[in-house]
């Protein structure tokens, strides 16, 4: 790889009458990014821009949660199946979900399709007064969530609630594993609601609603964004 890069540099030619410039050949725009460099070093094909990421970074959420959302959409959070795939777990370590103690802890099982997670999402749907079903993947679910709202800011507000739920589910999962925490659907959803309210309150100057107003009339609150 190093030899190939040096060969590309040494084969460059100067053209009289034109300004010199550096061009990063690993993407079509010619601009360097950590993502394209990582993919190049891994021998991967440079992927097209992923639509989920274009909207993710606009969500009203703190940076650590946005980073977690980014890892979620890439399928990189440290579920037991991912840890096993990376060779971190030892032979004999369980791959079973900490919540259900029955199925393997995959990303989609943990955050979407396990009955505990599904109940949290159904409470969210009833709260937002929408009818939908859980898609197959987290990426599809993220793109779909809030799609019924007409304005971009309302959709970003709804997607912030998506981040609050997956983040709260992950924190609850860790408490179950490391602190023998409770498996409580109501508590997880209530925590996600308040977490999203606090993010919107801090991140958007137009959002000045109380927690009661946020919980009782969410669509009105989102209309202020």
Image (cartoon, rainbow, N blue to C red):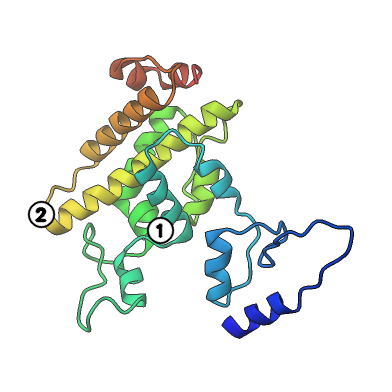
Horizontal and vertical percent position of residue 196: 35, 31
Q: Residue furthest right?
A: 17
| Residue at image location 51% in from the left, 52% down from the top | 139
| 22 horizontally vs 58: left or right | right
Q: At numbered mark 1, what does the secondary structure look like: helix, strand or loop?
A: helix
* Left or right, 199 with reference to 14: left
Residue at 21% from the left image edge and 37% from the top image edge: 187
- Whether residue 14 appears in this view of the structure is yes
Q: x, y (%) of residue 70? A: 45, 52
For label 1, the residue is: 108
Return the residue nearer the eye: 157 or 99: 157
> Residue 43: where, in percent of width, then height?
57, 77
Q: Residue at x 35, y 41 (%)?
A: 165
Q: Residue furthest left?
A: 180
Q: Considering only vertical position in the picture, is 62 above or below 49?
A: above
Q: Residue at x 42, y 18 (%)?
A: 207
**Secondary structure of residue under mark 2:** loop
Residue 189 or residue 224, whichever sits in front: 224
Q: Vertically, is 83 above or below 76?
A: below
Q: CA distance from mark 1 to mark 2?
A: 23 Å
State the residue position of label 2: 180
Residue 168: numbered disc: none
Which part of the image, by quadrant, shows the N terminus? bottom right
Q: Position of residue 116 (x, y in %)?
A: 28, 49
Q: Quadrant location of residue 123? A: top left
Mark 2 is surrounded, within 10 Å at the Cα level, by few (under 14), some (14 to 19) or many (20 or more) other residues, namely: few
Pointer 1 or 2: first along the chain: 1
Q: Quadrant of residue 113?
A: bottom left
């Amino acid at each position: 790889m190093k030899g190939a890069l040096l060969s590309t540099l040494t084969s460059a030619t100067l053209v009289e009458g034109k300004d010199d410039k550096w061009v990063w050949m690993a993407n079509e725009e010619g601009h360097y990014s950590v993502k394209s460099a990582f993919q190049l070093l891994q021998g991967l094909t440079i992927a097209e821009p992923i639509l989920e990421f274009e909207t993710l970074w606009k969500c009203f959420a703190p940076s650590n949660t946005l980073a977690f959302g980014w890892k979620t959409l890439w399928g990189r959070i440290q579920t037991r199946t991912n840890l096993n795939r990376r060779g971190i777990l030892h032979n004999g370590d369980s791959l079973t979900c900490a919540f259900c103690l029955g199925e393997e802890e995959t990303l989609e099982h943990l955050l979407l399709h396990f009955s505990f997670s599904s109940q949290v999402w159904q409470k969210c749907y009833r709260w937002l007064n929408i009818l939908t079903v859980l898609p197959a993947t987290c990426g599809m679910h993220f793109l779909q969530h809030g799609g019924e709202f007409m304005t971009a800011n309302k959709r970003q507000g709804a997607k912030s609630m998506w981040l609050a739920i997956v983040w709260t589910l992950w924190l609850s999962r860790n408490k179950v594993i490391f602190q023998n925490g409770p498996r409580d659907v109501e508590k997880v959803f209530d925590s996600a609601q308040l977490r999203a309210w606090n993010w919107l309150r801090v991140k958007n100057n137009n959002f000045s609603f109380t927690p009661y107003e946020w919980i009782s009339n969410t669509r009105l609150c989102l209309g202020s964004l």
